[in-house]
Image: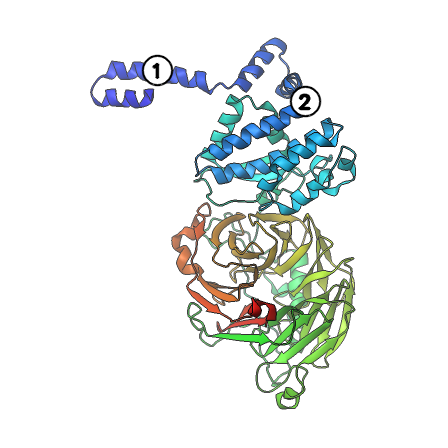
Amino acid sequence: LLELDSEFLGARGFEQASDALRAESSTDGRRTRESRLEKVIRRAQMLSGGSTDMILSSTLDARGSQNPTLFAESFSTYQDWAAASLERFRPELACVSFPLFVHCFLKILQLHPEESQARSFFNRWCNDFRLTNYREVQALSTLTGKADLEGDEYARSLLGPNRARFRVSLAKATFELLISFLTTSDLLLLVDLLNTYVSVSVQDRDPDMTIQASNLAAPGPSQPQDERVAWRTLSLPVANPQGEGSTPEDFPSLQHSQSDAPGQAGLLPRTGDQFNSQLLGKCMRHLPPAFPAGGPGAADLTREPRSELADASAPSVLMTTVLNAYQGMTSSQFTRDATRFAASFSDRLVRVWSLGQGQAAGGETAGAREEAGPVELRFHSHSVFSVSWSPEHRHLISGAGDGAICLWDLATAKAVACYRGHACPVWDAQFSPVGHYFVSASFDRTARLWSTDQAQPLRIFAGHYADVTCAAFHPNCNYVITGSTDRTARLWDLQSGKCLRIFAGHLGSIATLSVCPDGRYLATGSDDGTARIWDIPSGEQVALLEEHSAAIHSLDFSADGGTLATGSADCSVRIWDIAGSFGSALARTEEKLRISSTKRFWSKNTPICSVTWTRRNLLLAAGAFDVQHSLS
């Protein structure tokens, strides 16, 4: 107010009065900005000359850090203030509430030998977090005393020597408001919890108006978001027609760009590294035998299609409905040339249909197989949960509840290899864009990189706090991206096995993901009914798609990367014009857009299981007819 008065007087020509008010405002500002916490530390420093950490610890001890009642009272004060704050700050302040709730509850368990006080605190506040952090609340509900803290896995991850910290992103205005309240209200206990157990990222942007889940960051001194990502895709060399393929020497050594700013071309994959050169070279050597010269369906997948692309924003859609599945179809996938369709079932079978003329699914003519129905592939001893086509469409991999991954030869309709390494069910298995390698995701909380000619995995990607539900390769084959029921997606480097990015923001399990063909953007679909688009170099969310009313089971980018298709359990397929909606805002990752779908296609009673764009932008969708859905 004094600053406004000073500006008013200066504009009217009262210079001396304006200068006096400005000086008074400056003095008052310094006086009010010194919080109670700062006063305590300043006085203690004057007396002891010791370190700030020691002073803060002794101050907290003196103020009741060993009193469990103060933790409950401090958290209650914070919750009342956050609920009464302005609406624009409320969603981000709610993100801070959950880490404080968790550690206040754990502190009360540690300090109070009886269960009653901790249980009373938990029952009072747990319902505020069931929507955004259901799994964590369920884990905390099993803790009844101090003895449980040592045996519970979730508690050990929060309190152990290599503990993980909660990661919270706040706008600068929200952060300043939070610090001002905590210090002026003398909530030193909560300040200590935030300093010890929460990593706060302060960004110069407007406050986020959407509710975000609080997630754990990876333990360790360096954060994944600090690593550089070579996201740019690389045009693959043409396979040698004589069948020799390409060698690692055929790949030039490319230099990294010095900047990954959105306006530049982006970083190139490290083709000069030995691991990547061998990977790409080996893939190219395996491509030629898959294309018999002059044979039916012969094609060169390393060349760009010569035919013109259809308009992805107004697509032709082919919907395939599987009847009599009785809720037993778990996943499905089309080939990119729209000639075959494979689906996995809970009856331990993989079934393959032929959609085009000529060759049928098992190598016979389509006419000969028409009356016999689909080709049935039998090997697994438990329900099959995923299928994935190789790039040349001659082979198929499947992951099942028995922990095995099976490689099928469609020419003979037989299993040619079985890969065992997971100790739990395999939820997803996906081929790399150039074949030969594939990645698996499992209930054992790991994803694994495999080579078709080796029985053991080449890499194990461990870091998720719950089972890994889906996985996919980056288009340049340098990275693998995984999604999990811990509500995060992670980007892994194939060479080092390190986690380079954590994409956190969904309120439910991540069920599907897809990477834009140019390698820059990642789309994730969740059980919370939303899809989110992320900028891979920065790890930031850039768009929110929230029109579906049920879980999103599948999504896929068009061939040109400008359109996204999503399929949901609400029996709809929706088309999103990504390129047109983003416009120039794509370059500003701090701006989160809400995109509206441009096209909507509804099935009567068929929840959508998969959506796939062909190379010419024909959209393929599939699902199993749901009798119970039709009756409701």
Q: Position of residue 318 (x, y in %)?
A: 51, 75
Q: Secondary structure at mark 1?
A: helix
User: Mark 2: which amino acid?
Assistant: Asn
Q: Is residue 508 above or below residue 353?
A: above
CA gap, disc 1 and disc 2: 44 Å
Q: In the displayed structure, would residue 144 be above or below residue 433?
A: above
Q: Which mark is residue 23?
A: 1
**Marks 1 and 2: which is nearer the front?**
2
Is residue 543 among the parts visible in the rendering? yes
Tell me which amino acid carries mark 1: Ala
In the picture of the structure, the residue carrying the numbered disc 2 is 67
Q: Position of residue 289 (x, y in %)?
A: 67, 77
View extreme (top): residue: 47
Nearest the eye: 96 or 75: 75
| Outermost residue toward the bottom in this view | 368
Rate crowding at label 2 as few (under 14), some (14 to 19) or many (20 or more) other CA atoms within 10 Å: some
